[in-house]
Image (cartoon, rainbow, N blue to C red):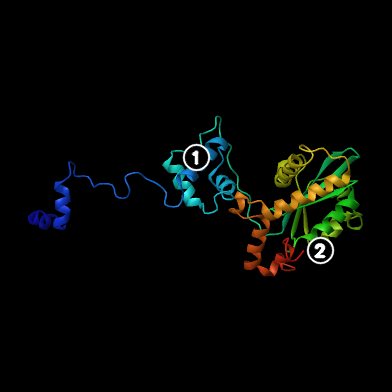
Amino acid sequence: MRAAARRYGVSPTTVQKWRARQTTADAAMGPKKPRSTILTQEEEAIIVAFRRHTLLPLDDCLYGLQPSIPHLTRSSLHRCLERHGISRLPEMEGDKPKKKRFADYAIGYVHIDIAEVRTEEGKLYLFVAIDRTSKLAFVKLEAEANRYTASDFLRALVAFVPYQIHTVLTDNGVQFCHAPRNRSGPTALYSRHMFYRVCHEHGIEHRLTKPNHPWTNGQVERMNRTIKDATVKRYHYETHEQIRAHLQLFVDAYNHARRLKTLRGLTPYEHVLQVWTKEPERFRLNPSHHIPGPYT
């Protein structure tokens, strides 16, 4: 053993271990049966059942399981799925569309759109705005959709967000701009649209999508669908006040409690607070005063 230890530059104890083996390969270290030091067997069973039943991505599983398993971390969840052989979701049939990344913008780039909702009392117009960076949402119900209500919505939006809005993106609806034939000519400077004037008052750049290109404003289109799925497509409202109250509760929960994968697990307002600590010059006031709780 001493001669072999000198020859291979190891200790005699290592050579002694080699003599008891049937192979020259190193033995595996650690426990013979892999297990978690953080999760119990019952908790691992819950995680496995949740993953197999929902087929959600890793981060969505984490957000869904943390309320019942508070000490669950992203790394421990990943290791648990690896141990049980379900760390990768099954591939879906068909070609995957190519992912296109949005250009990076500072906080304050807002998408605005209008949708229709109905109650027993009749039709309402839902004005929706969502920030491209923070995903902060703001909504307002109006009886009519015209340049006056659109301008009032923009003023309410400016008062709602704690930071400076620098860009607004809308479609080419008459609520937001003149018809193409009225956008040029000698009287164009004197016939600016009311929505444009409100943007100018607050130092906001107004951008328009290309005609017949609704996907350019896709973020707010997706938010419209999310709101409708949670309200008018799921519940029946007898009065306008019922949908106003429920809509406000949903938007508050979305802004302050819904954790988004695109924000790395933060809620929209948590992301706003994070930006405030890094770029306070973009803010008009302390955003923590908008959080429900002691300040309300």
On screen, residue 79 versus residue 273, left or right, reads: left
Name the residue: 58% across, 45% down. 60
**Number of numbered discs on residues:** 2
Amino acid carrying label 2: it is His
On the rendered image, what quadrant is the N terminus found in?
Answer: bottom left
Residue 239 x/y as whole percent: 89, 42
Kind of element beneath mark 2: loop
Is residue 134 at least partly visible in the picture? no
**Is 180 placed left or right of 84 in the picture?**
right
Q: Callout 1: few (<14), some (14-19), or many (20+) C-alpha neighbours within 10 Å?
A: some
State the separation of the CA atoms marked 2 and 1.
52 Å
Vertical placement of residue 32 versus 5, above or below: above
- Circle 2 Cα neighbour tier, 10 Å, few/some/many (<14 / 14–19 / ≥20): some
Which of 28 and 183 lies nearest the eye of the viewer? 28
The quadrant of the image that shows the C terminus is bottom right
Considering only order in the chain, which callout, 1 or 2, is on the residue closer to the N terminus?
A: 1
Tag 1 secondary structure: helix
Q: Nearer the viewer, mark 2 or mark 1?
A: 1
Question: Residue 234: horizontal and vertical position, in percent?
Answer: 76, 37
Extreme-left residue of the structure: 3
Question: What residue is drawn where x is 77% and y is 51%?
Answer: 249
Residue 29 at x, y percent in the picture = 29, 50
Residue 263 spot, x, y in % from top left: 61, 53
> Is 68 left or right of 186, judged from the image as shown?
left
Residue 80 falls in image quadrant: top left
Amino acid type of the residue tagged 1 in the rendering: Val
Q: Residue furthest top?
A: 93
Residue holding disc 1: 48
Can you see residue 60? yes
Residue of label 2: 202
Q: Is residue 202 left or right of residue 272?
A: right
